[in-house]
Image (cartoon, helix red, strand yellow):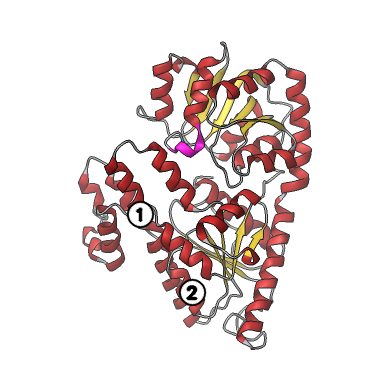
């Protein structure tokens, strides 16, 4: 996968829904997920991604290429201005572009039963709902969590003010409260959504994330490196706790080493901290990797470290256990839930390098315990988080949402979301459109 956790979730959920016989049309913005040949259609919504370009020293990159005058198109111009003033424009811009495409396709005669947003939560979703389509969303964790973490990183008043303006928390909270249902993947995330976004608990649906347990699986032909610790996280995000892991590495005896799946550049915070602590020779940053390469890393590592301050689910922990690799994770967010259900790891306090080092060392010194935890984790993840069961639970919520929407509108099943003559027949648990 090339698009992070949300892209992974989108890709696998869409695949499983089609396997259950549903029609799925996907509308997605950058970074785009891997090809989705199982979907009825995949629409790539272009975005200039001004925020990312803003940090380039070459300001000429800000202009759209090869047509620089496209910067004066309304949404592009607004996004550029929002970036200039420190706002993150992408969620709003994507939602409006998705709304336009949905409206145009409805006008052309296409019909869907339901729209499933994956954490964009822009104002355009309310426009889609106004078209008569029930809209649900998946929120892995509220953006307020990221904002609080950013405040921890800020060192000046200017940086703190930048954090205040950057995150569109108000928009996302307001939109989420008005959608038909909100999926989330853990009790920890549900508590945060109620506290931070004010979402009615009756509209929260607890459906765990899934893991492709056929793909993420052990391979006896891959030899384990008994001293290699794998971490899949962005060091630039304080919420991921990579700094704590590097500090724990400095406390571990050689030959213990960390392989970090993260952007490989000279200013990576993990690399800088490792240099300060004198353990940079035991830190390897491999950049963004393909799914196949990631599988190999999971299968080769002695253990996987997940040192986060908060996780709405903790996909690397679940993927590692599915591969038969034990996990040392922090007792933060949903990680205790995932490790309890998976059974393939141990928990340590977060933000505590000494405790993390002790937990890692205890497993590095016990090959038999690692093997036992690996087998137990594989069994637990397969039973708790397989994608077919997650998709089936998701479609049950779709059906409930459609029934409630039709009852509220006081009209029978034939509506703007039902199939029309000449289009494929829709049923309450059939086509889904993901935006």
Q: Earlier in the sequence, mark 1 or mark 2?
A: 1
Q: Position of residue 89 (x, y in %)?
A: 35, 58
Residue 113 picture location, percent across and down: 61, 75
In front of the other: 346 or 34: 346
Residue 409, above or below 386:
below
Q: Quadrant of residue 266?
A: top left
For image coordinates 62% across by 78% down, the residue present is 405
Residue 373 image position (x, y, % from top left): 75, 29
Q: Is residue 313 left or right of residue 167?
A: right
Q: In this figure, what is the number of numbered marks? A: 2
Residue 407 colored in magenta in the image: no
Residue range highlighted in magenta: 237-241
Query: Which disc number belongs to residue 128?
Result: 2
Judged from this view, the residue extending furthest toward the top is 254
Residue pictured at 27% horizontal, 43% vertical: 158
Q: How crowded is the residue under tag 2: few (<14 C-alpha within 10 Å), some, or many (20+)?
A: many
Dot 1: within a 10 Å radius of its alpha carbon, few (fewer than 14), some, or many (20 or more) residues?
A: many
Of 17 and 315, nearer the camera is: 315
Residue 88, label in figure:
1
**Which residue, as the protein is rendered here, is positioned at the far bottom?**
411
User: Is residue 303 shown left or right of residue 352?
Assistant: right
Quadrant position of the N terminus in the picture: top right
In contact (CB < 8 Å): disc 1 and disc 2: no
Find residue 97 and report its image quarter. bottom left
């Amino acid at each position: 996968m090339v698009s992070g956790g949300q892209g992974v979730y989108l890709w696998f959920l869409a695949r499983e829904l089609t396997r259950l016989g549903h029609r799925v049309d996907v509308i997605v913005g950058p970074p785009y997920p891997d090809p989705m040949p199982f979907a009825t259609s995949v629409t790539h919504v272009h975005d200039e991604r001004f925020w990312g370009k803003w940090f380039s020293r070459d300001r000429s990159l800000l202009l759209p290429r090869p047509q620089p005058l496209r910067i004066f198109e309304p949404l592009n111009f607004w996004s550029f201005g929002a970036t200039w003033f420190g706002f993150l424009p992408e969620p709003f811009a994507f939602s409006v572009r998705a709304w336009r495409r949905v409206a145009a396709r409805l006008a052309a005669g296409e019909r869907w039963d339901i729209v499933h947003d994956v954490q964009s939560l822009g104002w355009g979703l309310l426009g889609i709902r106004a078209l008569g389509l029930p809209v649900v969303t998946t929120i892995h964790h509220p953006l307020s969590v990221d904002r609080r973490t950013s405040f921890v990183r800020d060192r000046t008043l200017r940086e703190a003010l930048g954090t205040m303006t950057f995150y569109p928390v108000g928009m996302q909270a307001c939109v989420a409260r008005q959608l038909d249902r909100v999926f989330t993947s853990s009790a920890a995330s549900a508590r945060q959504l109620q506290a931070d976004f004010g979402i009615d608990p009756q509209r929260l649906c607890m459906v765990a994330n899934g893991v492709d347990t056929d793909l993420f699986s052990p391979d006896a032909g891959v030899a384990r490196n008994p001293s290699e610790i794998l971490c899949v996280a962005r060091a630039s995000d304080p919420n991921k706790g990579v700094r704590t892991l590097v500090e724990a590495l400095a406390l571990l005896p050689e030959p213990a080493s960390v392989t970090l799946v993260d952007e490989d550049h000279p200013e990576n915070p993990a690399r800088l901290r490792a240099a300060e602590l004198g353990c940079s020779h035991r830190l390897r940053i491999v950049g963004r990797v393909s799914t196949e390469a990631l599988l190999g890393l999971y299968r080769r590592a002695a253990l996987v470290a997940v040192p986060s301050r908060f996780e709405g689910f903790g996909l690397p922990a679940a993927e590692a256990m599915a591969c038969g690799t034990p996990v040392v994770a922090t007792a933060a967010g949903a990680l205790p839930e995932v490790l309890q259900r998976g059974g393939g790891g141990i928990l340590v306090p977060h933000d505590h390098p000494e405790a993390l080092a002790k937990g890692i060392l205890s497993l590095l010194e016990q090959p038999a315990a690692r093997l036992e935890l690996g087998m137990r984790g594989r069994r637990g993840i397969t039973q708790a988080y397989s994608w077919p069961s997650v998709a089936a639970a998701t479609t049950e919520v779709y059906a409930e949402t459609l029934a409630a929407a039709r009852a509220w509108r006081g009209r029978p099943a034939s509506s703007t979301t039902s199939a029309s003559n000449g289009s494929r027949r829709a049923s309450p648990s059939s086509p889904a459109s993901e935006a």
